[in-house]
Amino acid sequence: MGRSVSLFLLLAAHLTGVAIGQTLEKIVRTLGDTVSLPCHGIPSNGTLPVVQWLKDGGIAASRNLSSVLSPSGNMHFSISDQGNLTITGLLLSDEGIYRCSDYVLNRTTEKQTHIQLLIVSGPTDVSTDVKPAAALPNGTLFVQKDSTISFNCSSESYPSQVLSWVFQGSLLSSGNKSSLEFSIPSIQPTNQGMYSCISQNALSNQTASKSTSLLVYYAPDRHPECYCNAGNDSLQLLLHCSWPGSYPLPMLHWEAQLDARGTKQSILNVSVTAESLEVTLNRSQLYNGQTVECKAHNQVLNSEAKFCSITLRAPFPQGDPMVTVVEGRNVTLTCSESSSLPPAKTTWRRKISQEEIVPGTKYVVSELGPAFSLQIVNVTKEDEGPYFCRSENPLMVQELEVYLTVKSSESYAGGVVGAFIAALIIGIGIAIGTSAYRNRDRICLGGDFGLINEERNDVLHLVESDEEDIFDEPATRITTTANGHVTSLVQIHRIPSSDHEDLGTPEPEAEDETEPPQQELVTL
């Protein structure tokens, strides 16, 4: 820039008639100031009848005795007795190369001096613009993390200027135009700080600047974290909500409602500006299935709120309610509890008096995941009775009763033998029944049943009464009475096995005419 100014001065001197090699004095003044240009070579004891000041080859002002004439109408010009040219309220139009000429009476020698007057202005009206950005009440700007931010700076300066963007002492960008712009893609928290636009007049080296404090705000993409546990008092519930990684600090809000006869009553409504919030509720404010909610919100960014919630669950221990053990052996009672929230504290107790069991050589208490075990070593009759798996969280207490039955070794052996005999009998019966069922055809149609049918000689005949004489043995008669007369229903005769073949043609016998023949009634 200094080299270009020197070239400009040489060119101006040549155009205004300044010979190369002559001294050209340069005076720089600010727009609106007052300047006095000296007229060199004027005799200190002489009176000059005429003094002329030329600007760029033309008359700018002249003095004849005490009168100052300004052909260009610049009334803010004046010439002193010593021939100096004073200009008040400098204008940009006053810039140029001046020379002083004195014309001494009856002399033709001209004495001259050359002065270049340079007018500078600014830098003024330095302004900055950061987009997209919003302002806090104190004027501090803030932007959102990962957004692309554009910085623009402008200033008024004459004849020229150099603009620069500086971030906390480090140069980011510079240029010699009337404005300067640059951008930061995906701005990060490390880009937070003070940004300054500096404007420097290339001729006067005067500077002006404007600084802007920029904050980079951000909020986590994830939801806040909620968890709960029992307080120091088993009747109290501690609720925790945290949302780290937000700038500025977020607003956290816990909210819970209590159902009271079908209506909802707010029992928790707490807010704080912090990364975490912990609140306490009493058992009287809690019920099974209740939902509590925490809302996290970055108020400055006005972004969408994030939520987390907890559904409270009462404990519910489960297990086998009856256990039998032989005296002298070890037994393990178990129960499991995994549904409670916050997690319940589970302990073992015994007898109706709910004596708390102290772990030791007699009682071994263990926990594996949701399962809680109580091992009783060398069981005796005194160990018989109820045991309680007791689970408690801030909502309530729930118990599982396990009854332990202790049997002596003798009754145990008898029971085993009896069970074996019963099983043996049942097994034999099943085997016989199965075999008989499989051989049912052979048993029914052959074997003993077939022989019985061949040896039986009893034959059932339906005959009339006048044929009964063919039998050697008296007939067995089954009769009934109908309408006052005795009527035979059926007669059963035994036929000897030796007479089976002689029954073909029976010999006729004399009929008894004294009694009329009776008809037999057979009912099928």
Image: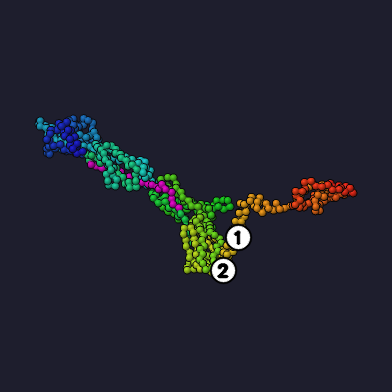
Q: Can you see residue 486?
A: yes
Q: Quadrant of the N terminus?
A: top left
Residue located 26% across and 39% down the image: 175
Q: Nearer the viewer, residue 504 or 53?
A: 504
Q: Residues within 10 Å of mark 2 (few under 14, many from 20)?
A: few
Residue located 34% across and 47% down the image: 189
Residue located 75% across and 52% down the image: 498
Q: Nearer the viewer, residue 292 or 29?
A: 292
Q: Residues within 10 Å of mark 1 (few under 14, many from 20)?
A: few
Residue located 35% across and 41% down the image: 148
Q: Amino acid at mark 1?
A: Ile
Callout 1–callout 2 Cβ contact below 8 Å: no
The tag on residue 81 is none
Q: How is the image coloured?
A: rainbow
Quadrant hosting residue 12: top left
Considering every residue shown, the one lying at the far right of the view is 514
Q: Position of residue 154 (x, y in %)?
A: 30, 39
Q: Amino acid at mark 2?
A: Glu
Check the image and report above or below for 351 versus 270.
below
Check the image and report above or below for 360 versus 55.
below
- Label 2: which residue? 410
Question: Foreground mark, 1 or 2?
Answer: 1
Q: Nearer the viewer, residue 53 or 453?
A: 453
- Label 1: which residue? 425
Q: Position of residue 211 (x, y in %)?
A: 31, 45
Q: Position of residue 173 (x, y in %)?
A: 27, 41
Q: CA distance from mark 1 to mark 2?
A: 23 Å
Q: Which residues are magenta?
A: 205-226
Quadrant hosting residue 417: bottom right
